């Protein structure tokens, strides 16, 4: 049987969850005997599209399948080029309305694997309720403007957070550096001295850990020797990142979102080997870490 070759295109190396995705894909590929190449687009959707088109149009090293987490759009023209060339195509995380059409017109596997972002937002709202039973003020670091995942997570959070919890929105780009910059900007505003923030929540672990770093630097620059009673919560929950930070006390909670790149590699390999289309749409469900009951008990 021919050895399969896949490309996994991810957004940035400067993000713990993206590195977790790469590790999960590499692990599954190794177990399945798939030759795998990981490429990163450096948060540039145009670069991602051009890089993948070059790979698709290269007759010398054309892959059997491409797993792509969009840095911008879901790249419909690139997906079509892959399907025409007989290359499997999997989209991670961002809805792609072309999937059904390509599946009906071409034989190569085309499918979508997403994470339930609304559920992520709802869990964060519930975490805020557990941490702030009497209400309070929260800084909430969102993903970049225009990100569907960021918008849906924010919507879910607003659906479950208590009315007596006031949320101030900041923006990041999923990286630790952007979380640090967002928090530094907030701390330089006069209003930051008037609003007693009790919780900083990030739509991923990287941004909230960047925010924590900025807050620690601010405290030390002001002559403080220890962190005040401010709590930080995130999302992604890798064993060596988010979960480890909860255990160390840097975060009080995170949300485990299993890395779906490994799932996609496995589904792609099985589909190609069987000559069948896999399930069109698969959703991965997030899990609160620690559980809401544990978090509520600790907050009493």
Image: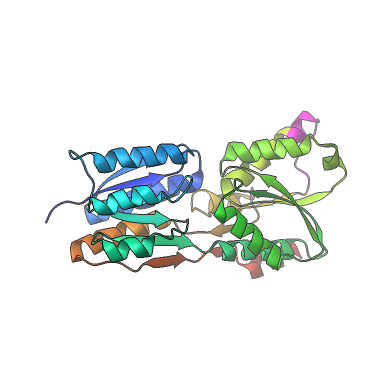
Seen in the image, is 41 located left or right of residue 190?
left
Q: Which corner quadrant of the image does residue 130 belong to?
A: bottom right
Q: Which residues are magenta?
A: 218-228
Q: Residue furthest left?
A: 1
Please indicate whether residue 277 sits to the left or right of residue 176 in the image.
left
Which residue is more in the foreground, 87 or 250?
A: 87
Q: Position of residue 76 (x, y in %)?
A: 39, 51
Along the viewing direction, whichever of 230 and 160 lies nearer the viewer: 160
Q: In this picture, is 291 found above or below 55?
A: below
Quadrant housing the N terminus: bottom left
* Protein image colouring: rainbow
Is residue 117 shown to the viewer in this render? yes
To which quarter of the image does residue 11 belong? top left
Name the foreground residue: 100 vs 250: 100
Q: Is residue 11 magenta?
A: no
Residue at image x 23%, y 47%? Answer: 63
Q: Is residue 294 above or below residue 56?
A: below
Q: Is 249 on the left or on the right of 187, as rendered?
A: left
Q: Quadrant of the C terminus?
A: bottom right
Number of disc labels = 0
At horizontal 21% and vertical 52% (from top left) the residue drawn is 33
Could you tell me residue 58's position as x and y percent? 23, 38
Question: Residue reaching furthest right?
Answer: 194
Q: Main secondary structure of the magenta part?
A: loop
Q: Is residue 119 above or below residue 184?
A: below
User: Relative to 38, does residue 104 appear above or below in the rendering?
Assistant: below
Q: Position of residue 158 (x, y in %)?
A: 70, 62
Residue at 49% of width from left, 53% of height from top? 239
Residue at 47% over, 56% down:
93
In the rendered image, residue 219 lying in the magenta stretch gets the answer yes
Q: Is residue 235 visible?
A: no
Viewer-nearest residue: 34 or 296: 34
């Amino acid at each position: 049987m021919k050895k399969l070759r896949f490309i996994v295109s991810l957004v940035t190396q400067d993000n713990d969850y993206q590195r977790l995705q790469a590790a999960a894909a590499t692990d599954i590929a190794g177990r399945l005997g798939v030759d795998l190449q990981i490429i990163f687009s450096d948060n540039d959707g145009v670069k991602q599209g051009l890089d993948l088109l070059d790979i698709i149009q290269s007759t010398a090293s054309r892959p059997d399948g491409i797993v792509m987490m969009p840095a911008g759009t879901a790249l419909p023209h690139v997906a079509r080029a892959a399907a025409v060339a007989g290359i499997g195509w999997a989209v991670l995380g961002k809805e792609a309305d072309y999937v059904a059409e390509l599946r009906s017109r071409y034989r190569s596997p085309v499918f979508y694997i997403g994470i339930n972002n609304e559920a992520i937002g709802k869990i964060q709202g519930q975490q805020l309720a557990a941490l702030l039973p009497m209400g309070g003020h929260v800084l909430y670091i969102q993903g970049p403007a225009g990100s569907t995942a960021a918008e849906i997570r924010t919507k879910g959070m607003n659906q479950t957070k208590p009315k007596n919890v006031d949320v101030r929105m900041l923006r990041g780009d999923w990286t630790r550096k952007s979380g640090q910059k967002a928090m530094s900007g907030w701390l330089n505003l006069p209003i930051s001295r008037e609003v007693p923030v009790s919780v900083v929540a990030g739509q991923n672990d990287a941004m909230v850990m960047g925010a924590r770093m900025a807050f620690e630097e601010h405290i030390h620059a002001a002559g403080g020797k220890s962190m005040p009673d401010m709590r930080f919560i995130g999302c992604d929950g890798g064993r060596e990142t988010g979960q480890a930070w909860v255990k160390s006390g840097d975060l009080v909670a995170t949300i485990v979102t299993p890395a779906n790149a490994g799932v996609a590699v496995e589904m792609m390999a099985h589909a190609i080997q069987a000559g069948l289309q896999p399930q069109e749409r698969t959703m991965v469900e997030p899990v609160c870490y620690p559980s809401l009951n544990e978090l509520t008990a600790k907050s009493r």
